[in-house]
Image (spheres, helix red, strand yellow):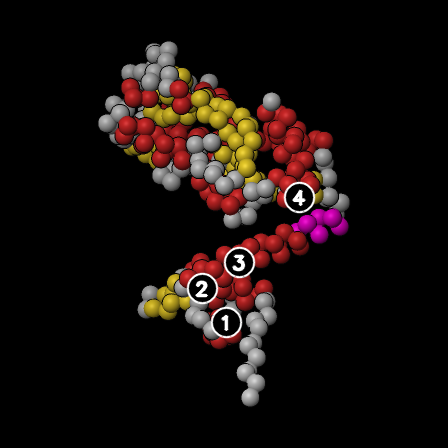
Amino acid sequence: MKPAKKRLWQVDFITLRLFVAVCEEASIAHAAEREAIVASAVSKRITDIEDVIGTPLLLRHRSGVTPTPAGEALLQHARLLLRGAEKMQAELSEYASGVRGHIHIYASVSAVVEFLPDDISAFLAQHDNIKVDMEERVSNQVIRAVEENSAAIGVCWDFADTRGLQVIPYKTDHLTAVVHPDHPLAKRESVSFEETLQYDHVGQQPESLMNLFLRRVAADTGKTVFNRIHVATFEAACRIVRANLAMSIIPAEAIAPYQTALDLRVIPLTDPWAHRRFVICMRDYEALPMPTRLFVDFIGKVAQ
């Protein structure tokens, strides 16, 4: 008697999208609502996959669902496949409208605020048939996006862990202490970061690399950073400083648009690490699409 043939799962993108939604929502019901489909249909599609591959993909419990190790593996592959399909559709539709290339960049907040848009503009002036998508993320998210192939290239502070990625030098910036004119430090020509720790700070997002870095530097001196407020943007930080609620550590290049308008005092930090370096990171330069390689080459020349 011949053994029964093992059924092969025919990958379909609708099921993959539903599975990703279930994992992201941690609930079949919520995923069904998000995708405008009945929950029983979502459940059946996932059960069918589990039957074919012979292992559960979800742990079902009273509060919702979580992926099993097999489910985590499928989730990673599903995201890559879905992004690839979306990219293929977008690029093909762009060719029909005259666009001849598409570049997807993840960049840190500082890079977006300080210099990257000007360099993209200069690049597009030479390549007007290429489209660029830029998404702002904190540096650790930039690295993760490049590692997971969500973005072809990333721009971030080199303090981030770029091991395993190819990097090229890009730009530098200079961290400063930004204070209200009435602040005790306002008349200083320069200041060390340690000297600022006796005052309230405006911190960036708790998960940001800058926030993590400053806390670590403070800890090395046996002190802590007291962030009275956390904000998401440099502009918001400047307005908090203008209200004389706290001081902030902000790159000189980012403070320029607000310094005069808000009458702020900008004091250079004396610490060697206050001169930050930014890099362009990628998985494999040779594997990049031609438009993205053109952009990386252009950025490399700009950085010289």
Q: Which mark is residue 289?
A: 4
**Side of 26 where 281 appears, left or right:** right
In this view of the protein, can residue 224 be seen by the observer? Answer: yes
Give the quarter of the figure containing the N terminus. bottom right
Residue occupying image coordinates x 59% and y 70%? 10
Residue designated by label 3: 77
Mark in the foreground, 3 or 1: 1
Is residue 234 placed above or below 69 in the rendered structure? above
Per the model, the C-alpha gap separating discs 2 and 3 is 11 Å
154 in the magenta segment:
no
Q: Secondary structure at mark 1?
A: helix
Query: Which is more toward the observer, 232 or 95?
Result: 95
Per the model, the C-alpha gap separating discs 2 and 4 is 31 Å
Residue designated by label 2: 70
The magenta stretch is: 90-96
Residue occupying image coordinates x 54% and y 34%? 167
> In x, y percent, where is residue 26?
40, 61
94 in the magenta segment:
yes
Among numbered discs 4 and 1, the one appearing first in the sequence: 1
Give the quarter of the figure containing the C terminus. top right
Density class for disc 4 (Cα within 10 Å; few <14, some 14-19, many ≥20) is few
* Chief SS of the magenta region: helix
Q: Give, as a three-letter code, the residue at label 3.
A: His
Residue designated by label 1: 53
Among numbered discs 2 and 3, the one appearing first in the sequence: 2
Residue occupying image coordinates x 44% and y 35%? 160
